[in-house]
Image (spheres, rainbow, N blue to C red):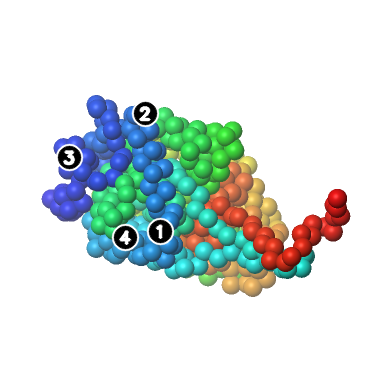
């Protein structure tokens, strides 16, 4: 009776007995190796899924290559029609898939629903995009010549996704890649493989219904080894990877060695600057959701608050009081605010970060700890914590995927911006201020160095319409909206001579 999770699993076709052999799309070919998915909500094993072995991987790639030959010839607006149906199917399963995401990964049910909504939104975006894959035309320097550019499909896109957004980040990549004429091989996090399997079961019948071949959407399951087959594989021209900076450095290097393309969306160390000119009610609410939403496991989670000294004490005490009202528990129960971390390793990383900030001289505003007793049997529930810290502390320079918020004090805005930018990562950022000069300075070329910079909004919860990603150790890639689609296509410049002469460019003479 765990909030209807069993009924949702049934409707999504995820059974605890070997859940996946009937998707119609190639994604496994393994005899014996299984990966179990455990829920951090109650510590129970949800189901096992077959791990992809090397033969299985080869079968997936060859199916994908064959599928690409066909898919790339389907007109882009027709491809968009199919993506529209995928969006509609997601609308129908929103509650069930949101619940599975919540149960397998531990985010609140509301956030699980939000994640499926992101998938629906990106499908809508991709449908429109399917008629807008525009190239430029240029004026040739030569008489009787025409120049323009075309965007052609790239081929197989390898998608490596993280546990924290187990379905939405895949859909940002897949929906765009599909309208661009690419085919996708998805290697989901081994911590959330069932959410991926559910997605595969949603999309596969739609391609099939339209007479499309297997291999437009494929799944490979396993640990880093399975990902490595793909990152080393020159048959996969683009690898789009979301996860830690540590992982991204390995993926980026491997793909670069074969001169492939990688699109990296890695760690953040996101801060909100809270000015003395802020609407403090708004600042507290923005900081609270940013820091404790998804139990601090978004790459956009708020990790640092850089607070002007005149409002520092007030912000600190109001945050402490807000934290005291947080209810931690089963994320499927909508009366709770914060669910568990993904697993016990994450709990250990959280505890070690707290030890480190204390050892560096950080002071607890709201102390952390692991919850025990009834309802917390999985051992993954922790208390959201706040520490006063200094920006240069080694642990503050790191992304810890947990609800730990560091408070840092500043006097003048240039100092706040320097502290803000003084970390290796560059994903998301925000300033809370009603002062126009401060807001514009923060967004200017001497302001935030992040890929995302907000005013009077927290650091998390970006909309799909913008390009998503960041600078420095965040990896530089951009996914989702705006013109991020260009990374999924190859650009071709065409020059056509319709004159009776053959003039050379740059006026070069070459006559015989
Ligand atoms: C991520 O954490 O990898 O902006 C993605 C946000 C969400 C996506 C986060 N829309 O917080």
Disc 4 residue crowd, few under 14, some 14–19, many 20+, Cα 10 Å: many
Q: Is residue 135 visible?
A: yes
Q: What is the count of numbered marks?
A: 4
Which residue, given by chain and number where applicable, does mark 1 sit on? 74
Q: Earlier in the sequence, mark 1 or mark 4?
A: 1
At which x and y percent is residue 145?
71, 66
The residue tagged 3 is: 16
Q: Is residue 169 visible?
A: no
Q: Position of residue 475 (x, y in %)?
A: 57, 45
Labels 2 and 3 touching (C-beta < 8 A): no
Q: Nearer the viewer, residue 132 or 90?
A: 132
> What element does badge 4 sit on?
helix
Question: On the image, numbered disc 4 is attached to which residue?
Answer: 86
- Please give the residue where the numbered disc 2 appears in the rendered image: 54
x, y percent for residue 179: 43, 59
* Contact check, label 3 and label 4, Cβ < 8 Å: no
Dots 1, 4 in contact, CB < 8 A:
no
The residue at the far front in this view is: 512
């Amino acid at each position: 009776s765990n909030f209807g999770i069993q009924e949702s699993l049934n409707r999504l076709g995820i059974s605890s007995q070997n859940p996946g052999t009937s998707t119609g799309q190639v994604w496994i070919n393994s005899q014996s190796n299984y990966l179990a998915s455990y829920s951090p909500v109650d510590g129970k094993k949800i189901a096992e899924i077959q791990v992809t072995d090397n033969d299985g991987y080869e079968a997936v790639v060859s199916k994908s290559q064959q599928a690409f030959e066909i898919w790339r010839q389907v007109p882009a607006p027709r491809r968009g029609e199919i993506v529209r149906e995928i969006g509609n199917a997601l609308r129908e399963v929103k509650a069930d898939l949101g619940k599975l995401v919540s149960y397998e990964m531990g985010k609140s049910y509301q956030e699980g629903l939000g994640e499926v909504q992101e998938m629906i939104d990106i499908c809508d975006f991709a449908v429109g995009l399917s008629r807008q894959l525009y190239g430029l035309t240029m004026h040739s320097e030569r008489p009787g010549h025409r120049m323009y550019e075309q965007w052609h499909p790239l081929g197989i896109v390898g998608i490596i996704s993280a546990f924290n957004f187990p379905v939405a980040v895949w859909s940002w990549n897949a929906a765009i890649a599909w309208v661009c004429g690419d085919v996708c091989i998805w290697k989901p996090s081994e911590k959330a493989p069932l959410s991926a399997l559910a997605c595969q079961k949603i999309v596969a019948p739609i391609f099939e219904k339209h007479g499309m071949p297997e291999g437009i959407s494929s799944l490979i399951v396993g640990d880093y080894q399975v990902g490595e087959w793909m990152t080393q594989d020159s048959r996969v021209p683009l690898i789009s990877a979301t996860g830690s900076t540590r992982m991204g450095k390995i993926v980026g290097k491997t793909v670069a060695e074969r001169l492939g393309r990688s699109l990296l969306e890695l760690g953040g160390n996101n801060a909100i600057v809270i000015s003395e000119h802020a609407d403090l009610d708004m600042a507290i609410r923005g900081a609270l959701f940013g820091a404790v939403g998804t139990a601090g496991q978004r790459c956009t989670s708020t990790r640092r608050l850089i607070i002007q000294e005149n409002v520092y004490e007030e912000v600190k005490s109001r945050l402490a009081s807000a934290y005291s009202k947080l209810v931690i528990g089963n994320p499927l129960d909508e009366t709770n605010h914060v669910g568990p971390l993904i697993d016990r390793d994450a709990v250990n990383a959280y505890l070690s970060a707290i030890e480190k900030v204390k050892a560096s001289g950080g002071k607890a505003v709201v102390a952390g700890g692991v919850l025990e007793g009834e309802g917390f049997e999985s051992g993954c529930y922790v208390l959201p914590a706040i520490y006063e810290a200094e920006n240069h502390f080694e642990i503050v320079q790191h992304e810890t995927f947990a609800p730990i918020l560091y408070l840092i004090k500043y006097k003048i805005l240039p100092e706040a911006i320097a502290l803000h930018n003084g970390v290796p990562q560059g994903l998301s950022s925000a300033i809370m201020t009603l002062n126009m000069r401060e807001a514009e300075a923060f967004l200017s070329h001497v302001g935030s160095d992040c890929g995302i910079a907000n005013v009077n909004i927290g650091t998390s919860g970006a909309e799909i319409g913008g390009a998503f990603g960041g600078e420095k150790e965040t990896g530089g890639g951009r996914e989702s909206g705006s013109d991020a689609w260009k990374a999924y296509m190859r650009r071709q410049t065409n020059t056509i001579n319709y004159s009776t002469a053959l003039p050379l460019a740059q006026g070069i003479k070459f006559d015989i």
